[in-house]
Image (cartoon, rainbow, N blue to C red):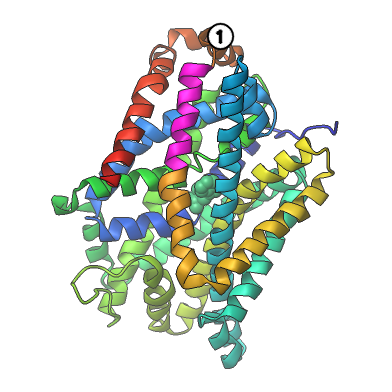
Amino acid sequence: MQQRGQFSSRLGFILAAAGSAVGLGNIWGFPTQTASNGGAAFLLIYLALIFVLAYPVLCAELLIGRHGQSNPVASMQLICSHRSTRKAATLVGLAGMITVSGILSFYAIVAGWMIAFMGEPLALMVGAEQPANWMTSFGVGRNLLFTAIFMLFTIWVVNAGVKEGIEKWSRRLMPALLVLLLLLIGYLLTQEGAADGLKAYLVPDWSHLSPELLLKAMGQSFFSLSLGVGTMMIYGSYLSRDENLPKLAAQVTLVDTGVAVLAGMLIMPAMYVALHNGVEIFDANGALISSGDLVFQVLPALFDTMGSAGLIAATVFFLLMSIAALTSSISMLEVPVAYVAERFALPRAKAGYLVGGAIMAFSVLVIFNFGFLFGKVISITTEYAQPLIGLMFAVFTGWVWKRNRLLNELRQSNPEIEQGLFWKIWPTYVKFICPLLIGAVVLQSLM
Ligand code: TRP
């Protein structure tokens, strides 16, 4: 057996877990969903779901991982005491691993676009018009090249190990990300039109409220906290036994949610500054343009109207996106790499190239069948698989894990926990409320 990695400090863990959570989901997904779903109405529902559903599930995942001190498949097995439940646990763990690989396969494509769009203003600065054009035009060649570049970065960091790769890079990149985000917000808020954007963001429009909206907000909250695929479980497994898990989970949740809310304060004003500068931001139905068009058309068009300051703003913005994507993608790749390395006793780097290469191969398949596969992979993995596997994690924590062993695992880190509210509520909560709520949201969306 090889020595298992571990985070070297509490801060290192928080930065790595927050790095996983903070990603394109926060800076792109959350603001665009907010923009097209009633502004603060979506924001409030999202916040409620984060604390009512996502946070308890995050605690469950971290706890299972830390208890198992192993990859998600093995950690899930370790909370079961019967053969039949152990089989089911294995299946759930494997399903998570396949899901996260699917998520990485499209995430790497989108992250590749971010790198390409960062290259464009740089190319323009040195007068290379043609390459600049190529990098921002949709095409198989461009997609292949930049997806591959991003995947190589991801593999390279993961192969360096938990402490020397994941933790080290999260420590470097997360503070950079925060600074860049604040700089951009500060700059944009000085521009004409920004106030209208803040208003659209912070005044709720409840006419968008619907069962669909709930599913979207739940999917977004699970995606944003990297839940339901074993990512947080594997990070939990690199934690030492004497950390106070509910508190760490709360800190990670707060950072993730804080960055999402901040990113809204960047993107929403940016849209209205763009409008003010003559860029079209409403579609034919009068709805705000969102999803892909926002980041790859509206924002570049906005930067175009800003002259040379726009070139710098564009570089900084897409650098921010690329950094956010990298600290997330490494947490995705870690799940299958840890499994393959531990299950088949392979050296970590070998597992990294094997698994990373296989996921890249799938990305290539998606790139060549983009119209057919891209949306489907996203919808299956994030809207259905993630919440449902998250539900299974809650069910296993509440129903399969022997109650006294679960409580022991909780108590281990801080014996005083028995006096607190978390202790009284959470075990029952994950047992009944989480599965019911998640199940209800998924079911009503299917009907
Ligand atoms: N949470 C990240 C984001 O918001 C993405 C992410 C990282 C993720 N690991 C994950 C999503 C695991 C789902 C599952 O962009």
What is the x, y in percent for residue 112? 58, 68
**Residue picked out by circle 1:** 415
Looking at the rendered image, the quarter that the C terminus falls into is: top left
> Residue flagged by tag 1: what amino acid is it?
Pro
What is the x, y in percent for residue 133? 54, 87
Neighbor class of circle 1 (other Cα within 10 Å; few <14, some 14-19, many 20+) is few
What is the x, y in percent for residue 22? 50, 49
Mark 1 lies within 8 Å of ligand 1 (Cβ measured)? no
Q: Is residue 197 above or below residue 171?
A: below
Q: Is residue 95 above or below residue 407?
A: below
The residue depicted at 31 percent of the width and 45 percent of the height is: 215
Please provide the residue range marked out in magenta: 386-400
The secondary structure that dominates the magenta segment is helix
Q: Nearer the viewer, residue 415 or 446?
A: 446
Which image quadrant for residue 92? top right
Judge from the rendering whether residue 368 lies leftward or rightward of residue 360; answer left or right: left
Looking at the rendered image, the quarter that the N terminus falls into is: top right
The residue depicted at 45 percent of the width and 60 percent of the height is: 376
Res. 79 in view? no
